[in-house]
Image (cartoon, rainbow, N blue to C red):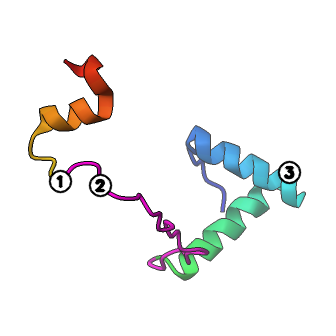
Amino acid sequence: MRTTLTIDDDVAAALERLQKKRGASFEKIVNDLLRSGLKEPNARPVSTATFRTPAVDLGELRIASIDNVARVLNIAEGEAFK
């Protein structure tokens, strides 16, 4: 079947990179990707890695409470705050 398809610039660039990497024709790349997408249209991509933020010891608090913003800024910035 022959049809005209308008492809967004970013998608076209990704297809061209894949075409160069695989050394296959543009039509083959598009057809392979469409076939794989149509097999599982509702499938979610498998996450390869979970990002975890490492815990860090921040030390002791320099102030008892942050309710007084002026006091916190005075401690953090010194006398230049005033």
Read off the residue under disc 1. Answer: 64
Bin the neighbour count of mark 2 within 10 Å (Cα to Cα): few under 14, some 14-19, many 20 and up.
few
Residue displayed at 71% across by 69% down: 32
Can see residue 22?
yes
Percent position of residue 44, x then y: 48, 76
Read off the residue under disc 2. Answer: 61
Of the residues under marks 1 and 3, which one precedes in the sequence?
3
Q: Is residue 4 left or right of residue 61?
A: right
Percent position of residue 33, x then y: 66, 67
Relative vertical location of residue 29 with respect to residue 63 in this rendering, above or below: below
Q: Main secondary structure of the magenta part?
A: loop
Q: Which residues are magenta?
A: 42-63
Residue 77: numbered disc:
none
Percent position of residue 2, x then y: 66, 56
Q: CA distance from mark 2 to mark 1?
A: 7 Å
Residue displayed at 76% across by 47% down: 16
Read off the residue under disc 3. Answer: 20
Number of numbered discs visible in the structure rendering:
3
Quarter of the image with the C terminus in it? top left
Question: Do tag 2 and tag 1 residues touch (Cβ < 8 Å)?
Answer: yes
Can see residue 24?
no
What amino acid is at disc 2? Answer: Leu
What amino acid is at disc 1? Answer: Ala
Residue displayed at 62% across by 67% down: 34
Q: CA distance from mark 3 to mark 2?
A: 56 Å
User: Does residue 61 show up magenta in the picture?
Assistant: yes
Comparing labels 1 and 3, the label whose residue is closer to the camera: 1
Of the residues under marks 3 and 2, which one precedes in the sequence?
3
- Does dot 1 land on a helix, a strand or a loop? loop
Q: Is residue 61 left or right of residue 70?
A: right
Relative vertical location of residue 26 with respect to residue 48 in this rendering, above or below: above
